Image (cartoon, helix red, strand yellow):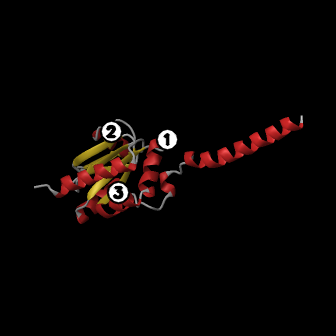
């Protein structure tokens, strides 16, 4: 009987240790809880891109999209990727389901309508747009930070080498 109690105590302790170690890796805070990237609204981002002649990184997300939150965490967690986005891009976010009004190519529409206009299949999607709003490329679905960085670097080089 004493041996059984010792075994149960050991199992309880192992369970607590295992949960303590593994649960934090599953916890993902919503993107807005971070101060690392100054995400802009679509209109403000387009205006800033025109003035600065930087390209736009447009993240299309939804509140319920788990992978969207991981992308945010990856960008914030990778110093090189975060610096690339902050220094070379105007970071813009659009909610796939939002009815918030934006202007695109002289037309007023909701963020949801904008995502349909841009033919977004569903979140997560990252688009790179030139300062005029023309799409240079897109990355659909979750990708590890190295792939995101390679994609963004390629898009930046494509923009900088324009005729």
Numbered tag placed on residue 91 in the rendering: 3
Q: Label 2 to label 3, Cα distance in Å?
A: 18 Å
Residue 61 on image: x %, y %: 41, 45
Q: Is residue 40 visible?
A: no
Of the numbered discs 2 and 3, the one sitting upstream in the chain is 3
To which residue does mark 1 refer?
Answer: 64
To which residue does mark 2 refer?
Answer: 120
Other-residue count near label 1 (Cα within 10 Å), few / some / many at <14 / 14–19 / ≥20: few
Secondary structure at numbered mark 2: loop
Residue under the point 29% across and 52% down: 152
Are the residues flagged by discs 2 and 3 in contact, CB closer than 8 Å?
Answer: no
Of the numbered discs 3 and 1, the one sitting upstream in the chain is 1
Q: Label 3 to label 1, Cα distance in Å?
A: 20 Å
Of the numbered discs 2 and 1, the one sitting upstream in the chain is 1
Q: Quadrant location of the N terminus?
A: top right
Residue under the point 37% across and 57% down: 81
Residue 126 on image: x %, y %: 34, 46
Residue under the point 71% across and 43% down: 14
Of 50 and 38, the residue lying toward us: 38
**Residue positioned most to the right:** 1
Of 156 and 32, the residue lying toward us: 156
**Residue positioned most to the front:** 3
Residue 117 on image: x %, y %: 28, 40
């Amino acid at each position: 009987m004493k041996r059984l109690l010792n075994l149960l105590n050991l199992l309880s302790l192992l369970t607590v240790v295992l949960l303590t170690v593994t649960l934090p890796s599953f916890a993902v805070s919503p993107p807005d809880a971070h101060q690392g990237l100054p995400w802009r609204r679509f209109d403000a981002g387009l205006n800033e891109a025109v003035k600065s002649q930087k390209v736009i990184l447009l993240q299309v997300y939804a509140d319920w999209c788990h992978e969207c939150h991981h992308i945010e965490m990856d960008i914030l967690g990778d110093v090189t990727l975060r610096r690339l986005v902050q220094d070379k891009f105007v970071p813009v976010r659009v909610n796939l389901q939002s009815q918030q009004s934006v202007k695109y190519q002289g037309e007023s529409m909701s963020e949801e309508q904008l995502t349909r206009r841009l033919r977004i299949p569903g979140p997560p999607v990252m688009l790179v747009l030139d300062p005029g709003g023309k799409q240079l490329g897109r990355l659909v679905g979750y990708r590890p930070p190295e792939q995101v960085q390679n994609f963004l670097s390629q898009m930046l080089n494509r923009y900088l080498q324009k005729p």
